Each structure stands twice: as structure tokens, then as C-alpha cells.
Image (tube, rainbow, N blue to C red):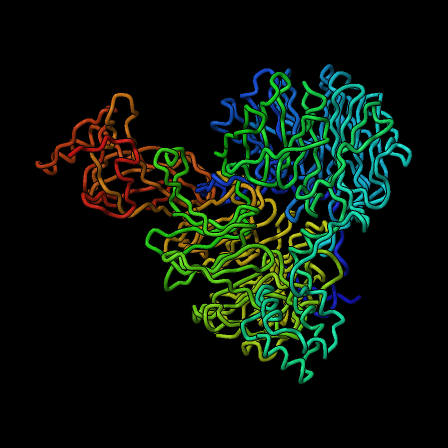
């Protein structure tokens, strides 16, 4: 295969055709090296001091994967979030603090705390096998509550399910490894260390597609363990959730040797339909297991339902003559109840059949098989609970009937059973709801509540107090003290899993975003998270959509008009002012195969006319009237789909050039990129010279050059973690790779800086980057920004804010004006400084309204750039050049930030009073003098260079307004 490369700096110019072979699975060794490279980039980055602020939201929380609770003091515990890291509380969940901000990854599968010695072990990589169950980097541990972390091996494990620490020997640890999600690998099974993680020995290996999803230990005998093996095969288009190799293994020697005990004669299910298994041990005899049984239900066991009226299947073999004899009223009822477009009435459809333009079976074809129908209505046996009272030799199902409405058809996402340590007949299982049994699993009762989110993944039962429960679910943490009769919600960490973010142009602009299983929310960008809303009853964010929240578009003419929706293309146009909402999902024509919708279907308002909406299915749809009517402006722009239970061959990204109406690019989940220059009149495939079969995670038509377009590809669903980032300067005819120095991590999003074409922002599964030379080199952001997946980015152009939607830590915002305003051609020898232009004077500076409150201390943010490190001096001068304040800072090469507390020296006070006899400056309560109303100069000196900026302290309401007094607890006046 011929390859022609022309090196341009650190970039790669691609020419020729078909130059890429099939992408390879990233090795654990390479992924571990990438983590080290990311740490190095963080340390060397010239933007490492640009601060990010987390603006929440918190109330809806994110997916919990595990809990580690102090059995002696259950008000102290750790919570592991799927992509939000590990958080610690010592006040029963009233507040939490992150212990993984310094960790190399926040993707957590399991945690275990050695409460005697203080070591916290973390198995990375969530095991729930969802669309966003990200791969980890193996085992980690901290001995100082997260100040420092050590990576402790198993780098190719990707997903770790369970950690068992020997209570008598903390150096002896048994780990269950689920292994790769999308590919086969050998580092899966049971691993054991006897030297505190320095070395690991594989103790159980079944095959390269079967891993360990759970390990449970006899609470009275560490030597006795049970392990659940899970044989599965996930692809982007299909999920085989069970297999012959799934089963239960037992060890009686602390995990050194294992024996399969779920044999055909044991009574436990075997065969190709055995899916995910969870295990709980009460003692040396009684063991429970829950299994996701993917075998189909016997015909005689299927519920006999006799639906009224016409059904979809009735049309499959219906003759024309029989169809034409149908009662109009009956046919009309079928059409309306099944969402046929209004144009299809009983009369018009009969006429189409009469003329032969369609056949009766086309009504069935029109409905297809909905993606949610695929997910929810598969006739499998589903969840089953088994119990053994002879230490696993034999098993018996505890219940007679099916456990319907527990797993539905996604049992892979759940799969746990828990037995009460004080009651061998008290068990808890969960899926969408959480339910309990007090008779050994014969009967169950729901313990859901209105303040408890659905989709449960973790539960802790107090070993000393039955009924005291801590539950982890897709909506965070809940605590109960009455066995689930009532629950407390404990959601203060900002761990929302955002798929998308957007902003409007209101004076105090708002941020919008869609979250995993937590809908779509909107709130002011300057919202300060805190407990105050619990007193006022007014939370800063508003929920505007349920389900799994997806993309959001806001009409630039009227921010009350919002387009958004939930999974598989269920989108609405919402008028937030009136509350009106209209369902706008495009519908195919009768006689046409149903459209395929991505989990996160792309939607776009045209930059040329905000009434024009684009919607990505497998075709590109366009509406000229705000989604009221649609027409396809393309044929299928994908490879055509694949047989499976997940929609595939769908559009994933759409962008239109701001320079030309109808210059549009589309990207699909199967790697196709198309371009049209005439609004869909003709299309050209432009991805043949790029790596094939990868998810097109983002396309961006440039705001600075009509011919320029950016593309990012994502190999996550192949376990390929290489960063694929490209730019074209000729409408996609040729591409140049600009991933340059990026460490291995799949790329989700790229954005241009709207004011400076050299600046690009990039989000990956492990962090956030900026390039100051259009991809020649990337710099890592890290100030108050952890190693979290970044799913979406927006730049609020007026305020020059970068808004970051993370999948695990909610939303961050950074002021990027120092970067955007920088003259990048002069950076090698530059020194610059800037601050807020105005700040309003307040008599509250340095004072308090109560002796029980700390004095309020103001801050004026300062940003500056220096081409070399050193000790800088900042001097504040009045308009006559008098020095009022001076302080020193240690600065790094690159962008730095600081705060000026607006104090002046006593000498400075005297100079100001001497210059103006009307000026009186008194000491504040904190014994400091504060700068009065006036115009001032801030001067920065470093290594013989000087830079300066101006700012003004106003007496009225200037820019950079401070919060009103009530925000600081100032007593209000009574009239």
C-alpha cells in the first residue's frame, strides 16, 4: 500500500487514497504511557494556570458505581462515580470532597478501603457496559486521601469489577477484572497480589471474551470466595449480552485456585443465554446470585395479551382487497395512535393502496422496530434470583414468577444482589427500580421513592443496623434509615455526565446541556453552587426535558425558543416563556424504510436563518419552518447500517459554513463524511483518505475560512484510543492530521476560537487542550480541571468564555480572553497583563455586618503572560503615578493569574488624601485600607521588562459587578 507523507512541523499531510489500514486496539502499555505523557503535558503547559470554575449543576448528580463505608462509623464513606471520580464524606453525605482531582483518571469501576491502615484502592474503568463506560488504566491506590496516587498495575484490564482486601493481611488483595468492552484481551479474570500490588498473578482465566463481573467473599472466612464470569460481546451496532462461558466459580484458598460450580446439574442456568451475574454471601452455607437470563421465554409462559384494534403485524401479509374492506374509523384510529403523519388518513392511505403506490405491508414497514422498542420489549426471561444453602453445590430459583419491570432488556447495566448481614432472608436487588424481599426472594416489594432516581448500581447495608441503607444510582446517592420506606438525597458533588452544552446571548448568558439519564437543564453561567437554594427554594438550574438529555440549539433571535430532546431523535421545540412544546422528530414517508436515529441525534439551526433546522438521521433532514415540516435533502449518508440491536449507520455530526448557505458537512457513526455545496442538491464523500470505520465525533466548518473544515474521529467503540484530529483547507478534498503531541485518548470535540483563527480547543476522554498554532502543538488545561472526559465545548463570543461540558464533572467555565487577545506572533518575547476594566466600590470591603461573620474581601482578577518564569512585581499607581500598593508573585512561563485584593498601603492612603483634600480613607474592620473611586494603573515588572493595564474603581454600577448584599448574608431592612 503506497503512502505519501509530507511533514509540516508536527503535522502530517495526507495524500493518495486508502492509505489507512484497520485501526488497532490500544495496548495497556501504550495507554499507561499516555497517562504519563498527559502528566508531563500538564506540568509543561503554558496554559496550566488558566483557572476553571465549576458552575454545577449538582442536584441531578451522576452515575454511582460503588460505595466504601466505614462499618464502625457509617457517617464516613466514599462514593465512586462512573466518570466523576471518588468523593469522601465524614458527615453522612451532608458535604463531600473529591479525592481524585490529582488522580490520572476519574473512570471508576470499584473501590475498597483498608479502614485499619488508611489505604484507598481504586479499580478503574466502569463495568456497567454502557455507551459511556470508559476504560480505566488498571489499579490505583492512595495512602493520603488523594494528595498523591500510585498506579499499581493491570494496565490492560480496562474495566475492574471488584477488589477484596484480606482483613488480616492488607498486602493480600484479590481483584476481579472484566476486561475490554469492545475487543478481546488476555488481561481479564481473577488477579491476586500478596505484596501490596507490586506484582500480580492471574489466578483464573476463562477466555479472551469472558471476564469477571463480580467477586464475593464469605464475611466469616476470607478464604472462601465466589466469582461471577460474564461472557459478552459488545459492538457499536450490537450487544450479545450472554454466552456459554458465563457462570459461577468458587475458591476455598483465598483465590489461588477456582472451580466452576454452576454446572448443568447444579440447578443454576447454563448455556448461551447466561448474562451478567451478581453474587452475595451470607455465611458458609447461604449464597445468593442474580442472573440476567437472556434465554427466550417459553411460548406457554408469554403473557396472553389481546390488544384492541388493528396491530402492526396485521398488515404484514394482508391482501389489497382485505385492506380496502377495513373500516375507515378502525384504520384511522390505528394511524393516529401509531404516529403516522397527519397527511396519512384512512381515506388517503386506501387511495394509495388502491393505486398500487404502496402495499398494506408498507404500514408495518413504516413503523419498523423502534430503538426504544428494541431496548425495552425483548421477550427474554430477564432477571432471576437463585439461592444456595449448601455453599454453592446446588441452586434453586427463589421466585415462581418472572421479575418483570426490573431489568427490561438491559440487564447488562445492573446485576447485583445484596443480603442483609443480619438476616439471611432479607435481600435487595435492583435495576430500573430497587426492590427488597424479606422471605428469601419469594416475594418482593418496591422501595423506590419520588426523590430516588431510577437505575441502581450500588447498595450498602449496615452490618450493625438492619434497615440503614446507602444507595447509589444514576442520580447520585440516597440514604435510608427505615429500610427504604423513606430516603434522604445527598447530592452536593458536581458530577453530572453531560453529553452536550450550549450557550445563549442573553446579557447574563445561560448555559444549557443534556445529561446521561438526567434530562436537559439550563441555568445562569455565573451560578454559585451552594446550600442556599434549599432555604430559598429556588435552584439555579431549571429542568426543561427528561430522559437522556441530548443536543440543544437556541434561537439567536429569541432565547426562549429552544430545540432539544432525548435519546434516539425524540426532539422538541420548546417555548420556555409560554411552556409550549412541539414534537419535531422527522418522519419518513409511507413506503419508505424508517429513518435510523443515533442515540445522540445531531440537530443544528442554520447560522443563516434561525427558522431553518437540520436534523441528522441516516439522511440529512431540513426544515424551513422551525421543525414543523421536514424534507430529506440527501440519500443515506452512511454505510447503510448493520444488523444488531443498536441503531447504527446514523449521522453523528452536522455543520454548515457561516460563509455560504447550503455548504454542509455530515459525519456518521460508521466513518463517512459527506459534503454538499448546494444545500443537498449533490453530495460528495470526502472521507476515503481518512482512517475508516471510526465514529465521526465532530465536524466544524470554520468561522475564519470558507474552505476550511475540521474533523475529529473517535475509536472508543473499537478500544482504539488514538487521537484522530484533522483539518482540510479545500472543503475536505485533502486532510492534514493535527493531533501532533496529543496523548492517547479518544477525541470528542473540537472548536475554533471565534476571534482568533490560530486558536483551537479540544476535548478528549481524558482532558481538555488548546492549540495556539492551529494544531501544531497542544497545551493541556489543568488548573482546577481534573482528568475527566470532555464531551462538548462552546465559546461565548461576547464574554470570551470557554464553556466545557464534561461527562462526569458537570460544567466548567474559563475566561479565555488572555489567550484569545494574545498576539501569538510575539509570544516568544512577550510580557502582557490585563484585568477587569471596572469594579464597583463598596463600603463592605474589609467589613462585616456582624461580629459572627468574616469581613468581605474583594478581588480584582489579574491575567498576564510571560515568556519566561521568574519573580514578578505588581505595582498599583494612581493617575499621577503615585505608588499605592506593591506585591510580588512567583510566576511560571506562560499564562498566569492572580488577584489584587484592592488594598493600599498607609503611605498610599496618605498620598491619595494629600492629592485630594475631599478624599477620606478609613481603616476597615480588618485593619486594612481600601482603594477609593478613581482611575488606576497596574504595572507588571519581570526580568527587566514592564507591562501595564488600566482599571477603574467606580462609584456606580460598573462592569464586573459584585453580588448584592443579600448574597453575603447582609441583614435586610424592614419597612
In the image, farthest residue toward the right:
265
Q: Is residue 756 visible?
A: no
Residue 150 coordinates in the image, percent (x, y) = 65, 29
In the picture, residue 826 is in which quadrant? Answer: bottom left
Left of 146 or right of it: where is 893? left
In the picture, residue 238 is in which quadrant? Answer: bottom right
Camera-nearest residue between 948 and 797: 797
Residue 172 coordinates in the image, percent (x, y) = 75, 21
Residue 656 coordinates in the image, percent (x, y) = 52, 68
Left of 799 or right of it: where is 397? right
Left of 278 or right of it: where is 548? left
The N terminus lies in quadrant: bottom right
Camera-nearest residue between 428 and 774: 428
Camera-nearest residue between 49 and 530: 530
* Relative height, residue 315 to residue 854 (above, below): below
Q: Residue at x 78, y 67 (%)?
A: 2
In the picture, residue 967 is in which quadrant? Answer: top left
Left of 862 or right of it: where is 213? right
Q: Residue at x 37, y 34 (%)?
A: 532
* Relative height, residue 351 to residue 289 (above, below): below
* Relative height, residue 574 to residue 475 (above, below): below
The C terminus lies in quadrant: top left
Q: Is residue 99 visible?
A: yes
Q: Residue at x 72, y 78 (%)?
A: 320
In the image, farthest residue toward the left:
917
Residue 653 coordinates in the image, percent (x, y) = 58, 62
* Relative height, residue 451 to residue 654 (above, below): above
Camera-nearest residue between 679 and 39: 679
**Callout count:** 0
Q: Residue at x 75, y 27 (%)?
A: 216
Amino acid at each position: 500500500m503506497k503512502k505519501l507523507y509530507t511533514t509540516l512541523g508536527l503535522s502530517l499531510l495526507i495524500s493518495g487514497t486508502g492509505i489507512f489500514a484497520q485501526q488497532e486496539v490500544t495496548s495497556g502499555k501504550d495507554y499507561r504511557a499516555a497517562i504519563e505523557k498527559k502528566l508531563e503535558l500538564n506540568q509543561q503547559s503554558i496554559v496550566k494556570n488558566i483557572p476553571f470554575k465549576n458552575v454545577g449543576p449538582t442536584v441531578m448528580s451522576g452515575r454511582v458505581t460503588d460505595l466504601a463505608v466505614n462499618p464502625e462509623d457509617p457517617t464516613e464513606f466514599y462514593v465512586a462515580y462512573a466518570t466523576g471520580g471518588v468523593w469522601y464524606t465524614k458527615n453522612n453525605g451532608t458535604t463531600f470532597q473529591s479525592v481524585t482531582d490529582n488522580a490520572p483518571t476519574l473512570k471508576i469501576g470499584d473501590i475498597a478501603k483498608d479502614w485499619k491502615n488508611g489505604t484507598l484502592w481504586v479499580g478503574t474503568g466502569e463495568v456497567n457496559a454502557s455507551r459511556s463506560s470508559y476504560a480505566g488504566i488498571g489499579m490505583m491506590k492512595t495512602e493520603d486521601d488523594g494528595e498523591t496516587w500510585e498506579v499499581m498495575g493491570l494496565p490492560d484490564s480496562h474495566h475492574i469489577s471488584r477488589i477484596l482486601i484480606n482483613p488480616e493481611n492488607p498486602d493480600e488483595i484479590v481483584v476481579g477484572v472484566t476486561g475490554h468492552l469492545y475487543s478481546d484481551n488476555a488481561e481479564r479474570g481473577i488477579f491476586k497480589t500478596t505484596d501490596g500490588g507490586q506484582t500480580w498473578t492471574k489466578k483464573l482465566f476463562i477466555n479472551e471474551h469472558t471476564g469477571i463481573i463480580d467477586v464475593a467473599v464469605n464475611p466469616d472466612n476470607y478464604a472462601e470466595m465466589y466469582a461471577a464470569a460474564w461472557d459478552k460481546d459488545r459492538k457499536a451496532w450490537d450487544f450479545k449480552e450472554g454466552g456459554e462461558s458465563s457462570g459461577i466459580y468458587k475458591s476455598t484458598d483465598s483465590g489461588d485456585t477456582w472451580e466452576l460450580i454452576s454446572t448443568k446439574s447444579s440447578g443454576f442456568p447454563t448455556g448461551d443465554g447466561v448474562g451478567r451475574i451478581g453474587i452475595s454471601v451470607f455465611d458458609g452455607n447461604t449464597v445468593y446470585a442474580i442472573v440476567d437470563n437472556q434465554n427466550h421465554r417459553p411460548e406457554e409462559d408469554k403473557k396472553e395479551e389481546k390488544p384492541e384494534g388493528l396491530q402492526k403485524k396485521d398488515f404484514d401479509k394482508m391482501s389489497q382487497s382485505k385492506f380496502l374492506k377495513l373500516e375507515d374509523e378502525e384504520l384511522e384510529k390505528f394511524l393516529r395512535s401509531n404516529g403516522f403523519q397527519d397527511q396519512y388518513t384512512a381515506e388517503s392511505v386506501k387511495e394509495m393502496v388502491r393505486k398500487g403506490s404502496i402495499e398494506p405491508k408498507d404500514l408495518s414497514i413504516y413503523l419498523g422496530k423502534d430503538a426504544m422498542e428494541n431496548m425495552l420489549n425483548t421477550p427474554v426471561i430477564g432477571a432471576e434470583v437463585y439461592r444456595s444453602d449448601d455453599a454453592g453445590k446446588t441452586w434453586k430459583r427463589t421466585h415462581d414468577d418472572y421479575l418483570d419491570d426490573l431489568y427490561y432488556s438491559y440487564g447488562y447495566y445492573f446485576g447485583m444482589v445484596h443480603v442483609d448481614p443480619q438476616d439471611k432472608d432479607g435481600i435487595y436487588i435492583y435495576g430500573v427500580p430497587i426492590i427488597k424481599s424479606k422471605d428469601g426472594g419469594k416475594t418482593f416489594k418496591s422501595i423506590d421513592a419520588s426523590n430516588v432516581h431510577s437505575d441502581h448500581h450500588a447498595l450498602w447495608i449496615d452490618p450493625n443496623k438492619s434497615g440503614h441503607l446507602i444507595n447509589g444510582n444514576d442520580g447520585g446517592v440516597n440514604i435510608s434509615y427505615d429500610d427504604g420506606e423513606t430516603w434522604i438525597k445527598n447530592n452536593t458533588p458536581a458530577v453530572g455526565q453531560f453529553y452536550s452544552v450550549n450557550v445563549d446571548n442573553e446579557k447574563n448568558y445561560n448555559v444549557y446541556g443534556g445529561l446521561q439519564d438526567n434530562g436537559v437543564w439550563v441555568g445562569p453561567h455565573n451560578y454559585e453552587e451552594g446550600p442556599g437554594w434549599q432555604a430559598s427554594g429556588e435552584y439555579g438550574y431549571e429542568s426543561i426535558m427528561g430522559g437522556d438529555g441530548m443536543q440543544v440549539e437556541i434561537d439567536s433571535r429569541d432565547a426562549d425558543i429552544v430545540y432539544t430532546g432525548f435519546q434516539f431523535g425524540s426532539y422538541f421545540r420548546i417555548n420556555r416563556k409560554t411552556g409550549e412544546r412541539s414534537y419535531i422528530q422527522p418522519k419518513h414517508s409511507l413506503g419508505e424504510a424508517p429513518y435510523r436515529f443515533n442515540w445522540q441525534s445531531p440537530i443544528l439551526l442554520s447560522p443563516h436563518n434561525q427558522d431553518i433546522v437540520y436534523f441528522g438521521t441516516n439522511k440529512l433532514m431540513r426544515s424551513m419552518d422551525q421543525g414543523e415540516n421536514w424534507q430529506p435533502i440527501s440519500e443515506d449518508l452512511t454505510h447503510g447500517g448493520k444488523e444488531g440491536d443498536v441503531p447504527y449507520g446514523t449521522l453523528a455530526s452536522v455543520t454548515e459554513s457561516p460563509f455560504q448557505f447550503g455548504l454542509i458537512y455530515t459525519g456518521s457513526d460508521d466513518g463517512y463524511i459527506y459534503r454538499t455545496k448546494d444545500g443537498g442538491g449533490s453530495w460528495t464523500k470526502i472521507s476515503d483518505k481518512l482512517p475508516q470505520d471510526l465514529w465521526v465525533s465532530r465536524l466544524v466548518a470554520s468561522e475564519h475560512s470558507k474552505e476550511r473544515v475540521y474533523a475529529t474521529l473517535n475509536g472508543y467503540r473499537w478500544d482504539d484510543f488514538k487521537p484522530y484530529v484533522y483539518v482540510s483547507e479545500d472543503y475536505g478534498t485533502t486532510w492534514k492530521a493535527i493531533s501532533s503531541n496529543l496523548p492517547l485518548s479518544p477525541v470528542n470535540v473540537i472548536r475554533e476560537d471565534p476571534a482568533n483563527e490560530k486558536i483551537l480547543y479540544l476535548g478528549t476522554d481524558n482532558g481538555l487542550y488548546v492549540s495556539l498554532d492551529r494544531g501544531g502543538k497542544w497545551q493541556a488545561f489543568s488548573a482546577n480541571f481534573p482528568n475527566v472526559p470532555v464531551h462538548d465545548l462552546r465559546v461565548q463570543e461576547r464574554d470570551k468564555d470557554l464553556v466545557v461540558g464534561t461527562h462526569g464533572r458537570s460544567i466548567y467555565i474559563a475566561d479565555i480572553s488572555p489567550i484569545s487577545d494574545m498576539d501569538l506572533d510575539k509570544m516568544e518575547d512577550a510580557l502582557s497583563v490585563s484585568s477587569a476594566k471596572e469594579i464597583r466600590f463598596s463600603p463592605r470591603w474589609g467589613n462585616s455586618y456582624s461580629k459572627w461573620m468574616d469581613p468581605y474581601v474583594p478581588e480584582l482578577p489579574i491575567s498576564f503572560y510571560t515568556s519566561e518564569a521568574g519573580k514578578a512585581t505588581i505595582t498599583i499607581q494612581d493617575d499621577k503615578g503615585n505608588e499605592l500598593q506593591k506585591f510580588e508573585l512567583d510566576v511560571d512561563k506562560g499564562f498566569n493569574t492572580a488577584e489584587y485584593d484592592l488594598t493600599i498601603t498607609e503611605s498610599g492612603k496618605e498620598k491619595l488624601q494629600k492629592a485630594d483634600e475631599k478624599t477620606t480613607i478609613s481603616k476597615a474592620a480588618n485593619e486594612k485600607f481600601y482603594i477609593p473611586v478613581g482611575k488606576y494603573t497596574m504595572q507588571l515588572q519581570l526580568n527587566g521588562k514592564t507591562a501595564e493595564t488600566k482599571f477603574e474603581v467606580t462609584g456606580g454600577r460598573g462592569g464586573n459587578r459584585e453580588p448584592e448584599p443579600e448574597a453575603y448574608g447582609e441583614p435586610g431592612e424592614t419597612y
